[in-house]
Structure formats: C-alpha cells, structure tokens
Amino acid sequence: MSNGFEAAEAQRNWLERLIEKIPGFRGFQDRELRRDVDKLQREHLAAEVGRVKGKLRETARDYTDAGRIAILDRFERLDRRFDGLSQSIRFTDYGATGLFDAVKIGEAELARIYEFDVSLLADVAELEAGVDRVPPPGGGDAEGALDSLLAALRAVEAKWGRREEVISSVVRSAG
C-alpha cells in the first residue's frame, strides 16, 4: 500500500505518457491518479471492516442458535457501528481534500498518509482479534468482551475521523 501511487503511475500506457507532456496536464493527471489510489485504499480498508463485521455476525448467530438472545442487542449495536465505519470509509468525499489540490505532494508526504492508512489496517486487525476474543456461548464473559470490542471500535471510528486532519497537515507541510 505504501507505493500504490508509484505502481499506478508506472502502469500508464504510451498515450498517457505522451499526453503528460502537455503543460499543466501532468499535475491534473497526478491528482486523478492520487484520487484513484486513495479510492482503492479506502475500498480495501472498508472491505476489511466488512469482513470483520461478518465474523462478528457469525458469532452472533452462534449465540442465537444457543438461545442466548439477551446479549444480541450488544451484537446488534456493534454490527451497526461496524457498518457505519465501513460506509464512512468507503464514501468519504475523497475529492474535497487538499491532497488533490495543485500542491506538489512529495514522496515523504505521501508516505505519511499511507503510513496512517496502514495503521488503520492494523487497527482493523486488532478489531478482528477482539471479535475472536468473544467466547462461545456459555464459555465466559461475552458482555465484557463485547464492551471491550465496542470501545476499540469507537477508537478506530475517532481515528478515521482524524484522517482529514492528517491529509491537511501533510498538504500544509508540502505547500
């Protein structure tokens, strides 16, 4: 993920490389490529959140099958929050950020943004570990595990909300 922009740029065809010689077009093309890479990264992150949500649903089904329906409201609350995070990631208005302005963004600045995004993937992996810590029905303190998972999910939601700030600080440092 750290070199997505460079990989996408390297895959341009001969016509795109010829057209980029038009004055001013290269900056436009770079912005469009950054948008595409950003969208792909966000779609991947949202898919990972959705995958973890699916694991949580499987666990909830186990509780339903075991007749432990009193705890299902906690599962439902988590399900809605996972869905909200996934949708927020997937549908963020990526075209409105300063990252796509005419400011020249260098490799170091892009690396900071990619580093932030990679850290979000690590956070999602930790959420998955939290889902895995929910004991099977009758096997332990499910309420505590679900409460811990909810707290971790809230932290990831807050961190995602700060992504725009990270991008803005990178753009300011590049400008």
Image (cartoon, rainbow, N blue to C red):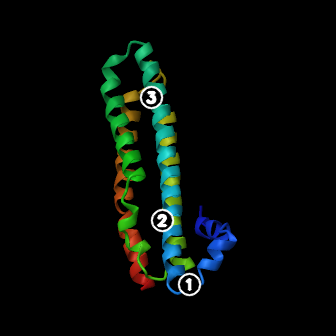
Q: Which residue is mark 3?
A: 57
Question: What is the C-alpha distance between the residues marked 1 and 3?
Answer: 52 Å
Foreground pick, 59 / 143: 59
The mark found on residue 4 in the picture is: none
Q: The residue under label 3 is which amino acid type? A: Arg
Q: Residue at x 39, y 76 (%)?
A: 169
Q: Residue at x 60, y 84 (%)?
A: 21
Q: Which residue is mark 1?
A: 22
- Local packing at callout 1 (Cα closer than 10 Å; few below 14, some 14-19, many 20+) is few
Of callouts 1 and 3, the N-terminal one: 1
Q: Secondary structure at mark 2?
A: helix
Q: Quadrant of residue 100?
A: bottom left
Q: The residue under label 1 is which amino acid type? A: Ile
Q: Secondary structure at mark 1?
A: loop
Q: Quadrant of residue 68?
A: top left
Q: Which residue is mark 2?
A: 35
Residue 150 at x, y = what percent? Answer: 36, 41
- Local packing at callout 2 (Cα closer than 10 Å; few below 14, some 14-19, many 20+) is some
Q: Secondary structure at mark 3?
A: helix
Are the residues tagged 1 and 2 within 8 Å (C-beta)? no
Q: The residue under label 2 is which amino acid type? A: Arg
